[in-house]
Image: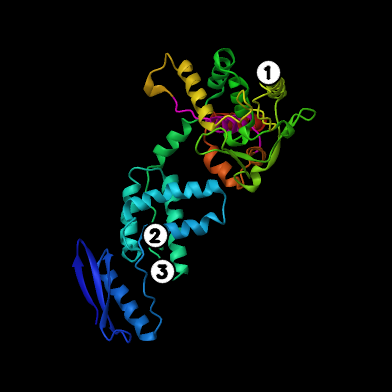
Amino acid sequence: MASIRKKNGSWEYIVSAGKNPATGKYEKITKSGFRTKTEAKEAARRVEEELKQGTYIKESKMTFGELFQEWLAYYEKRVKISSVRARSIAAKRLLDEWEYHPISDITLATYQKHMDKLSEDFSANYIDSIHSTARMIFTYAEKHKFIRENPTDFFEKPRILKDKEVENKLDNFLEREELMKFLSIAKEEGLRGDFVIFATLAYSGLRVGELLALKESNINFKTNEISVQHTYYNPNNNKKEFSLLSPKTDGSRRTLELDSFVMNLIREHIKQIKVEKMENRKIYNDQGFIFVDVEGYPMPIKSVSLRLQRLMKIMYKDVDQDKRKHITPHSFRHTNISLMIESGIPVNEIQRRVGHKDINTTLNIYTHMTKHTKDQSANLFSKHLSELTEKLR
């Protein structure tokens, strides 16, 4: 018969495992961290039943930190380096709590409690990332019989203030008039390449990594098309230590048509790059990239961000701090999608142009991005039925 007791604010079971034939000593199976006495009793009952049937799995004594390192070595051999980095960042929130804890001590109750606590400080998307990472790690442990039960099973995502998140997302793009003002500033006061970089981002909807990976061979001036085949990856911001990875999703490999205005900007920029290449031919690292520094290396994403911050300071010089939008290079992708929605471009065409794998991404995230869209939809519908409405009056 199992013994159930309360310990350190949670419940614990102690089950007799009988005599160990190797040592001749009687052994006990102990586990704590249960939220209620009933949960501890039920878990103990399952252990006793498994001992009786000979199916009991003895849990590993390894720590979560040790499990993470073993799983990471396995994971690194199967995915892109950018995915490894993203999972490692998310896992830090788990390591902060359990790095030196035995994995057998991590129960659903302790896992749920930790995730609830994290949800007070982080967005829903980040909580999803942490949970999916934890799920991978503990599923690996379960598969290799390091644990008897997966603590991420039956996890219930905590309620997060969605209205606040949506409000933040809505601020993360430029309205049409704001974009016009920003690009005018980039043209008049921008550094070398600023105008063409931000105009291309705004008119194309490219991710900044996709933009920086573009080579002259990806541009077709006859058809005004660009071909997206890679994304730039450089987590350490060392311009000489970068990688070209496959795009984010299968749908991200795409060809899209661009406005002749932007194509002409790119054409003139390439001409300028060729002049610089000749002037700096002794040190120029020519790999065919378009958006480069004077030595021919693709511009690190951090450099693009710093250039953007400089231009936004100029744009907002007479605007109170609390009324300024938080604009990042990715905001131009949001801006592009919002303008396409306002223009009445079909959602499936928007999906194709921006490279969303799932059309629900386009629908769920971006269809409410501008304050004008609802009014515009109502006006278009009203105009379409105006003749019928007059007859019915």
User: Of residues 300 and 132, which is closer to you in this image?
Assistant: 300
Side (left or right) of 339 relative to 12: right
Instruction: Nearest to the eye among marks 2 and 1: give it.
Output: 1
Residue at (61, 21) in percent of width and height: 193
Residue identifier under label 1: 279
> Crowdedness of circle 3 by 10 Å Cα count: few (<14), some, many (20+)?
many
User: Of residues 346 and 131, which is closer to you in this image?
Assistant: 131
Amino acid type, residue under disc 2 in the picture: Glu
Residue identifier under label 3: 146
* Label located before the other in sequence (2 or 1): 2
User: Is 61 above or below relative to 315?
Assistant: below
Magenta range:
325-346
Side (left or right) of 166 relative to 358: left
Instruction: Nearest to the eye among marks 2 and 3: give it.
Output: 2
User: Is 192 above or below relative to 115?
Assistant: above
Residue identifier under label 2: 66
* Label located before the other in sequence (3 or 1): 3
Residue at (35, 63) in percent of width and height: 103
Residue 40 lies in quadrant: bottom left
